Image (cartoon, coloured by chain):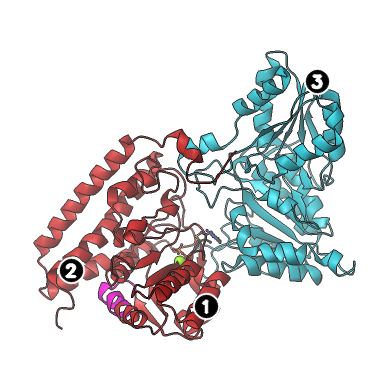
Amino acid sequence: MSQPLSAEQLLGAWRRMVTIREFEERLHREMPKGMIPGFTHLYSGQEAIAVGVCDTLDREDVIVSTHRGHGHCLAKGCEVKPMMQEIYGRAGGLCGGKGGSMHIADFSKGMLGANGIVGGGPPLATGAALAFRNLGNRRVSVGFGGDGSANQGTVFEAMNMAVVLKVPTLFVFENNGYSENTAADYAIGARDLAERCAAFGMPAETGDGTDFFDVYERTQRAVERARNGEGPSSLVFTCTRFFGHFEGDPQKYRAADEVDTFRQTMDCLSKFRDRVTGEGWLEEAALQQVHDEVLALIDEAVEEAMAAPLPDLATLTTDVYTTY
Amino acid sequence: MPVMSYREALTDAYRLSMRKDPRVCILGEDVAGGAGASGQRNIGGIFGPWPDFLPEFGEQRMIDTPISESAIVGTAVGAALCGLRPVAEIMFSDFLGLCLDQIWNQAAKFRYMFGGQTSCPVVIRVNTGAGMSAGSQHSQTGYGMMTNIPGLKVVVPASPADVKGLVMTAIEDPDPVIIFDHKSLFTDKGEVPEGEFYLPFGEAELVREGDDCTIVAISRMVKFSQKAADALAKDGISVDIVNPRTLSPLDEETILESVEHTGRLVVVDESNPRCSAATDIAALVASKGFSSLKAPIEMVTAPHTPPPFAPNLERAYLPGPKDIEAAVRRTLKG
Ligand SMILES: Cc1ncc(C[n+]2csc(CCOP(=O)(O)OP(=O)(O)O)c2C)c(N)n1
Ligand SMILES: [Mg+2]
């Protein structure tokens, strides 16, 4: 098959996917040390979706993310170091330490925020797309969600509204099989989630969330439709998460060998590596060099975050109207 | 009396109520857990309140739901109208935003709006409060807003004994009741009566008796007020601490009697201050107990901001024993 993306684009995608993976693997090792506050939900295993989707977007396009948002942030261009500082609750974090892992945002990159409310994001994606429609530009929005979020009324409403208003938005559902410890097959009453999305009156398809190329191509078609004024689409990507729902989750609801098996069979990074080297699109050495650079960057980011100053206490009452 | 943790007392109360009344069932996200999954079923709930409820009570009474808060509460409310005694669990009180209509316009209104034809015996249980760096959308309270709703009873337990007695009462109450369990209380221990135990709604607990000032404290703030009182006692200052236990109905009498005795009032609530439980209690005393007051009422609350993530900001956000102590001292200066 002909090379779908330039070598530079492919190497960029690899860098972003590896950055997400190593960022999360590192957080997983750092969490038990007790310096990372709050709840942290890792994205390992789902990298091909965030990167495959965001690589079809322009810088001016926007995404709305979820509680499992680190991957979306990195894929949309958020910088590793200020993200790390945010996760450590430091002054130099993207939100000054006020947000944390579940609320990372960088509006300068079109990343409108991770969201602690399951189903909180998709209506915002519809609204962003309404703004683009009325302002007459060709930007699009993407609302990410999990299989669990697909059952939230807010999401149904946002999808229907997007169809009614014919706005340029994409609803991307990452079906990793679980919402917390409930299986998607149990909680989604419809046999097929994509069919249910289609019932709202928009194109909807299911793709392989562990295959970067599949994600990229399906998303590219949907983005094209949106930019051409043909309205919203839904994309469902099957995948798995390599860690628990949150860091500290004992995962008793998963079969003992499930994660090990999935790491063998559903690793989007090895699939990408095998494909691009097998087709002769990229050299193994180039991939390895990027990987090494990423590891060095993450080492630095963690070290700097741990040494970084805490937020000034005066910022407790800034950025909000209060006389109290 | 046996000593148990808040979580154990909570579990005990629901288990006894479910054994006593087969109409009681629990609905929510992952309340049993592991539905349809490849591993273990019966995980026991988020924060672990339902250990082995699934094997004992079965899937008809331990109902795992999709992430659909509006339908969780609405389903519980509809079932309550037609013969069940459901408990709807909303994982964090911040998520009340998604099911507000079913609480505010549906459950709370039916008995009145339908001219007394029906009651709506539903219980909504939520985990609440700051202190875990859980960020702006997982650390709020919300009981102030709920107290603003006529027809809804609002329960704020402060101890293991409280939660046991108040839960058992809530389940048998004919009206909709919302119970706010503070996440940071779950591992606290205390004496709890064995067997069936009921605490009446609208009866505050006088946690500590003193002469110089009244502290009315809500939920976790009762514990912090005890610490403040211990510190004040070293300087010969003694305080009444009132734990309202329920904000709706509110035991006005106990609060007013205490202020009549001490002449001073400090209200402590970790929620945001505007239109809150704290302002409500302050207004009660200002309007009905004004002549008892020897000093302006003090309120110790969070600032009027969302809860921040960074631990140092969150500590500054939350009222602590030192803030309470300082407020009591201010009332004594005047
Ligand atoms: C409104 C709301 N309900 C419940 C939760 C608690 N919660 C956080 S993540 C989650 C599961 C989400 O599942 P899914 O959408 O599949 O995303 P995943 O975690 O698999 O990425 C739940 C129930 C929440 N944060 N917000
Ligand atoms: Mg999921």
- Residue highlighted by disc 2: A9
| Mark 2 and mark 3 on one chain | no
Say what secondary structure mark 3 lies in: loop
Whole-number angstrom distance, CA of label 1 to CA of label 3: 61 Å
Q: Of the residues tagged 1 and 3, which is closer to the observer?
A: 1
- Residue highlighted by disc 3: B211
Q: Is residue B112 something that shows in the picture?
A: yes
Determine whether, in the image, residue B226 is placed left or right of residue B287: left
Q: In this orientation, which residue lies closer to the viewer: A87 or A112?
A: A112
**Rendering colour (chain A):** red
Q: Of the residues tagged 1 and 2, which is closer to the observer?
A: 1
In the image, the chain rendered in cyan is B
- Residue highlighted by disc 1: A161
Whole-number angstrom distance, CA of label 2 to CA of label 3: 75 Å
Give the class, few, some or many, for how many residues have Cα within 10 Å of label 2's Cα (few <14, many ≥20). few
* Magenta residues, start to end: A209-219
Q: Residue at x 78, y 67 (%)?
A: B80
